[in-house]
Amino acid sequence: MSARRPGLRTAVDIGGTFTDLVLYDDATGGVKFEKALSTPRALADAILQCLAKAEAAPAAIAHLVHGSTVAINAVIQRKGALTALVTTAGFEDVHEIGRANRPDTFNLFFEKPAPLVPATRRFGVVERVGPSGEVRTPLSEASLKRVIMQLKRASAEAVAICLLHSYANPAHEAAAKQAIEAALPGVYVTASHEILREYREYERGSTTVLNAFVGPEVNRYLTDLGGRLKAGGFSGVFHLMQSNGGVMSAERARQVPVAMMESGPAGGIIGAAALGRVLGHADVIAFDMGGTTAKTCLVERGLPKMTEQYFIGGYRDGFPLRLPVVDIVEVGAGGGSIAWIDAGGALKVGPQSAGAEPGPACYGRGGAAPTVTDVNLLLGRLNPRRFFGGEFDLDTGAAEGAVARIGQPLQLGPVEAAAGILTLADARMSFAVRAITLQRGYDPRDFAMVAFGGAGPLHAAAIARELSIPTVIIPPQPGHFSALGMLLTDLRHDHVLTRVTDFARLTADELGAWFQPLEEAGRAALAAEAHDQANVLLLRSLDMRYAGQEYTVTVPVGERLDGPAAMGELRRRFDAVYEQRYGHAGADDPAEIVNLRLTCLGAVGKPDFAQLRDKRIAAPAADRRPVYFAAAGGFVDSPVQQRAGLQPGAHVAGPAVIEEYASTTILHPGDRATVEPNGCLVLEIGAG
Amino acid sequence: MKRQDEIDPITLTVIWKGLLSIAEELGLTLRHTAFSEGVREGDDFSTAVFDAKGRMIAQGPFSPGHLGSFPYVVQAVLRDYFPPDRLRPGDGILLNDSALGSGHFPDTFQIMPVFMGERLIGFVCNSAHQVDMGGAAPGSQKVHGVTEAFQEGLRILPVRFIRGGEPDEDILRLVTGNVRMPDKVRGDLMAQHAANRSAAVRLEALFREQGPERVEAAYEILLDRSEASMRQALAKVPAGTYSFEDHVDDYGPETPPIRIAVDVTFDGKGEVTVDFSRSSDQVPAAINSYLNYTRAYAIFAIKVFCDALWPQNAGNMRPIRIVAREGSFFNPRFPAPSGGRAALQVRIFDTINGAIAQALPERAMGAFSHWSNPNIGGIDDRTGRPFVLYDVGLAGYGGRHDRDGVEGLSPVMNCSNIPVEVHETLNPVRVRRLEFIANSGGAGRHRGGCGLRKDIELLNSTATLSLLGDRHKFQPYGLAGGEPGALAETILNPGRNARTLPSKALLQIEKGDVVSFRLSGAGGYGPPGERDPQAIAEDIADGYVTPEHAAAKYRFAPAE
């Protein structure tokens, strides 16, 4: 595609409850936001509904970006394909043995989750490759034939292949895949080297199994959605959001569906990074608070922090997935989080959530447990009559009853109890922000916070204050921001190659030569997506450690890689990255590299942020009401503004409440907000 | 509970979570910067925060082995070596004595006093398993042929290792001059210090934010509540004395078994005494369990059974008494050697489990598969540099009253195994197989977990193999009519001149030798005759048992 093609740009984020759509018109700069209930059985329906509501014909859409929970739901509900696993003979049980550690030291009652592939569908082929890629035992044709028979007998719908040291030499895996595909037409086959070329057989195998497990389902979904969009006249570019914050083509998604596991949350993080850049903040803390959890991620110099491994579905019940994913720390504190008293008599908040049904007590749908939303209502922070733009009223009496009940055994009145629950919820969320900043050697004072999600703007100022973050940015339509962020992403592919090597013995030329095949693979993937090669950015980095360590830090490699000077610079950079992370470094100690990493970015045309204000909502007159502020020791009569009525350049001084459709921003005494030309609210915390 | 009026429940929670996060963060930093395999793979380290009186307030969720000894370590150091009034800002104390510390020299403790201005507000501490502390064999854990602690390496009684915030280079030189891998030990000592330093900054910040009076008032409440919760849990256990006996294989080739006997007495009012006095006398080999180590795993076991989810501190340890006759295997006199005592942690737990099963049959389980902790070391032919393959073999859990034992999970200590691809990249070895051993789990209404087999071939010209395993002679017991798991075996060159090796030994191996580690199966629970035929059929399909074994143990005939 060309870098920019005029027309409508659309992003669709399918979440558990709602499908969010953002429509951006390149020609006029206009933006529209729509919502529809997600339809679990036919996810494509909600997309088409949203488009109809926005009066956008599929034929008019030049570019559609899509984030979907189809892959992660298949895993969490264990509803993927009947999957088989082919390993090196003698290692069939590695998938079940795993790494053998447990989440809590003191809990010996921990039950490991059942493996995705049981012993009855794990088959070994006779072959062996060594750590340098040398073939020690050739692939046995006879054993491969036997495995194919076993796969047929097991009626496998998907097959994962993970052979030892295939990251160093994929020949056996490739041959096995070819033979299996030829013998079993229609079966979805994945080989581990196609997903990642990194050592650690259990984790690589788990990632490959996950890919095979969701492959058939994701392919059906893409075929259905693609067909229906096409039938509606859509002929634009179709991209899928990945967990790494980039997008990929549908063709690539069919091969590596595991890359779209965390596609929803990634959109908001990318949006926060882009918004920060527009407003002159390259270093940003993205803060996304919804109904069930709060998520936070660090953006440094415009790039979200990534992590190389996470457990899909959580450490307790999940499986490791080793692909780069935006490094989100999540805590069970959202609007629906329930307050409770533990066995020792201490007040706690979350992680249990009242969800949408029955919801917080104040929704009046039968919820009896006090939630963070109830507390916000009691403390005057939410408007009982303008929730979701007035779509339904909140029941203050029910909220008060629920909070009073929990306060009683603690001898706390409803307001005291509510204030306590608010403090604890804010503390939980600030621990999450602390985890991505202070615990990793970053000073929160050097960052701006971008707060979004329906509940983010309610709590952002308090968390920022706690951690001395000077600036908070609230984008327009904070509840839709994840979908908006998807419009701002580039094509992205990550490649990794394990090469454990003594750094001192490595020359710049050798290192450059090792990167070569990764770069070729990256460019080829982008070319296959019909991407203009002029807009390609390659980012190289190395996973490094001191010789004798196990854990690594990731060190960026500069554009020029020539001569000993470049290697010296790399070494200094490693020491500096290590020192920043851990507070000490060993400049004289031998270092080694473990992995080469390459990120390939293909720039995609994006809307600018000049005009993101939603002008649909009429602004009612300003109002006042008492709002509780702990620092003031109680309720303070505070002005209430409608965001739609605030013009660019307007200032609001705290204490104040700024309301909009589906979200509310709280300014504490001493905070000050300014409205930017693009509609963002910029809060200066404690500015006076 | 009067003090509760002085501090609101919200502030209390904020302080408590703050302390836990300091202790946890300290450990995460240590794990990620460590050079020692024991720390980074085996999680063989611990962290804790103490108050100014030396009482343990909070711990990180790491190795139970040091967690349980920490309070005794800090108290002894403050009482006998460094009274608080002799400590100054910028100080840090180092020790590794086996009697004062956690039972063997490789565990180095670092204790840092924390000040707010001139006022002592507490201590942050961590311990880490160093790769070597000198002595008779690499790793300082040789069992057989070591008869006194002085053969086990460098013994450090508490010294002021950090002065004015900087390590004492003289002490560092003395230490690194006595160990086999000085760079690694130096790196880990510095990592321990750096981790303490960052925790101290956070503790001071917490005190400044909340004020020392409020934090200290919170400490009293936390300790009292922890104690009350533990007493409440202990009081629920039917009063009585519950006894159990088992044996460790031996303490080296051609040595007799070691008896482990425990008497656990619940008084019905909230206290428990765990007494190991009836066990064997201390032995002339490096496997004795110093009292701090015995305490650590005994307390761990009590917590697991009675109060697992309440974080450990000085409060909930108050109602637990751990006793062992002086001069016995579980309370030896210095200089008893103790380097290989890691083999005992699972056995201490197993024995208490056997006793408590009589009182709490629904909490107990059949005995663990045990574990193996072998080392293969030498000079790599390819590079001329030393290599040490440190391995951790982890297998099954015993059956419980309501479910089968879990497969492939770390018992007691919380370790990870090491990937085959990592071993082969770093060391001249090839792993030939890694798999469950069919028919090894003890039969029962609920089957014990399977043992694991791992075969390692040496590709180097020669190497030293050190074996630290157990359950080669005494099977992991079953409970309530469940059968014991199959015995462990270690076999050199299976299939060609096979030779059976003892569980604990040191020997040379040559290129092409294959060492086959076969961990025991875990114990079953309940009579095998009560096992659900459907579960047996699934076991056969999954390969956990063979049809022949199912027929013999369960009289199982497959449905047509």
Image: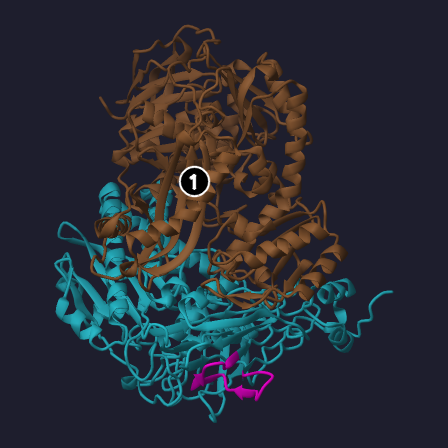
The residue sitting at the bottom extreme is B254
The chain under label 1 reads A
Report whether A110 appears left or right of B551.
Answer: left
Query: Visible in this render: residue B68?
Result: no
Viewer-proximal residue, B384 or B111?
B384
Q: Could you tell me which residue is drawn at 67 percent across and 74 percent down?
A: B439
Residue B488 picture location, percent across and down: 57, 80
Residue A601 picture location, percent across and down: 42, 35
Residue A413 picture location, percent across and down: 42, 31
At numbered mark 1, what does the secondary structure look like: helix, strand or loop? loop
Viewer-proximal residue, B509 or A411?
B509
> Residue B426, relative to residue B549: is it above or below?
above
> Residue A500, relative to residue A619: is it above or below?
below
Q: Amino acid under label 1? A: Ile
> Residue B263, relative to residue A375: is it above or below?
below
Q: Is residue B494 magenta?
A: yes
Q: Colour of chain B?
A: cyan
Q: Is residue A594 magenta?
A: no
Q: Quadrant of the C terminus of chain B?
A: bottom right
Report whether B262 appears left or right of B199.
Answer: right
Residue A330 picture location, percent across and down: 45, 40
Chain part drawn in magenta: B492-515
- Residue A523, image quadrant: top left
Q: Could you tell me which residue is drawn at 50 percent across and 89 percent down?
A: B257
Q: Colour of chain A?
A: brown
Crowd around label 1: few <14 · some 14–19 · many ≥20 (10 Å): many
**Residue underneath mark 1:** A328
The residue sitting at the right extreme is B560
Viewer-proximal residue, B169 or A432?
B169
Query: Visible in this render: residue B447?
Result: yes
